[in-house]
Image (spheres, grey):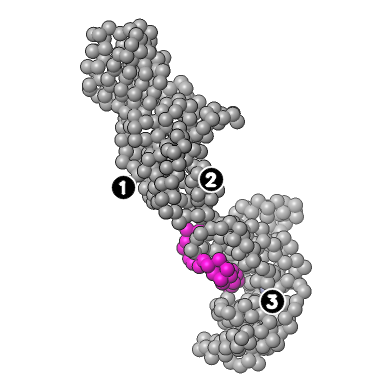
Amino acid sequence: MADTVVESAIANFLASPKTAYHSIEQLQKAAAALHKSNLCVFCVLRFLSFELGSIYQQQAGVAAKLEIPNARNSPCVACLGILNYDLADHVVSKYHEERFDAANVVIGIELPKSIAIRHRSMQLFCSSNDEIPTRLSDVVDIKDAMKYMISQRLFKECGIYAIGDSQMRIDLVVGHSESASEHQFLTGQQDKSDNINRKRRNANANSGDSRIAIINELAACSDEKFLANFASPPPAVLQGVQLETVSFKRASLFIGGRYLKLERNISQTPFIIGGRRVAELSVAEIIGEPVKVLTRCDSYNLVGSGREDADVRMLGDGRPFYLECINPRFTHLEQWQIHDIEHQLALNSSPVQTRRLQLIQPEDTKIIKEGEENKTKHYCALVWFAKQLSAEKLEEINQIGQKELVLQQKTPIRVLHRRAPLVRPKKILSLKVVHIQERFYKASIESEAGTYIKEFVHGDLGRTTPSLAEMAGETADILELDVESVSLDFPPP
Ligand SMILES: [Zn+2]
């Protein structure tokens, strides 16, 4: 079976109109010359210009047919052993370990910088060798060969396709310390001490040393200069490559909805000052943790359409928000699974509940950001005045409150440590104050986004003007505050 694969691949290759080879003997001669310069079977096939296909998986058959000894102790001088190294094994086992539910994937590969230098050296070797008539433009790229072999395995063992564009990426970084300074004659950095060069390699960010710089220098380098600095065929190496990292990255998944905060002292996101947690619970964690379990994501971010303070409740039909799940393993969510999270929060009388929790599209998250500017909010505040207000005073305040009121609001003292000191004009759209008993009042306030309501009530030492305290002519304090509604239509129907 394996023999027929090899035989028919060779027959097709020789019959192809674009081939530079016309007999098996000619192929064998070229293969022998390539193998003698220390190439592995894969690289022999690449430099003979065999198109990627099942023949690449038949090393022993190819070696027998082309009469090249199969066993080699030292790593291949062209691929540094990459094509013999079982990179695909690592990728497949990591994929199984992580249990992604992707249907397809993009494979990204970062090779040792010396691979490009060694490829040039091999090109020069082939073009100066009459036994190797391969057209250099037909040589198979090493990255394409790696991707081919990895994608074959991924499809067979994990059932996923490697394609050009996908929500999921596998990135491999392959290193080879032994040849790490081979490009230095090109980038003019060979004069630096070894120590500095090692540091530079480790930093991997120096522009003169970057991959692009090396490719450009290589293109600009004459054959004479190249051959004066580098052997052709490439020199032998003792060690093969190392796989430095294999990482899987999946595009974020977005879940949108509205949250209700039925108790006080819950921050929107984990609230930590100087390493200490200020509020024990956060909206983000109460909603995010069960979503994390469901999607097996690395982490999550909650983005709300504005935020209330930790001691302010969020009532009514809740505040619009979305949760970004970063690098989710499981994305084929059914609406019932998401609804179940909402249902469990309600069932357990969680202090944070959700409404209309659902999968949303990445572009829907813009609604939250844009809504930031133009939504309005209704608040209900429990207010205390230093003295009970007269009926006339209350009437006067409510008269003013029927019309739009423009405030000049300086950045509140309590947020000055994290916000720039500015004066912001803000609108109170309506205000209604009702006496409860003694010096306690209930204020219903409708305001535009970004208004600091606590400061509108007590005046923030004159930093917000006018304020309810100023209108009443009395010291005022806010005892409790609830957000009753946030007028933004989200999530989209
Ligand atoms: Zn090789």
Q: Position of residue 439 (x, y in %)?
A: 35, 10
Q: Secondary structure at mark 2?
A: strand
Residue name at image x 58 percent, y 76 percent: 140
Q: Residues within 10 Å of mark 3 (few under 14, many from 20)?
A: many
The quarter of the picture where residue 153 lies is bottom right
Q: Which mark is residue 40?
A: 3
Q: Spatial distance from mark 3 to mark 1, Cα to Cα?
A: 59 Å
Q: Position of residue 250 (x, y in %)?
A: 51, 55
The amino acid pointed to by label 2 is: Ser
Counting residues from the start of the chain, the first of labels 3 and 1 encountered is 3
User: Do callouts 3 and 1 mark residues in contact (Cβ within 8 Å)?
Assistant: no
Q: Secondary structure at mark 1?
A: loop
Q: Is mark 2 within 8 Å of ligand 1?
A: no
Whether residue 189 is visible, yes or no, is: yes
What secondary structure predominates along the stretch shown in magenta? helix
Counting residues from the start of the chain, the first of labels 2 and 3 encountered is 3
Label 2 sits on residue: 299
The amino acid pointed to by label 3 is: Cys
Q: Is mark 3 within 8 Å of ligand 1?
A: yes
The image shows residue 130, relative to residue 380, as above or below, that is below
Label 1 sits on residue: 493
Q: Position of residue 361 (x, y in %)?
A: 39, 51
Q: Which residues are magenta?
A: 141-168
**Tally of marks:** 3
The image shows residue 401, relative to residue 347, as above or below, that is above
Q: Position of residue 179 (x, y in %)?
A: 71, 64
Ligand 1 shows up in the quarter that is bottom right
Residue name at image x 50 percent, y 60 percent: 102
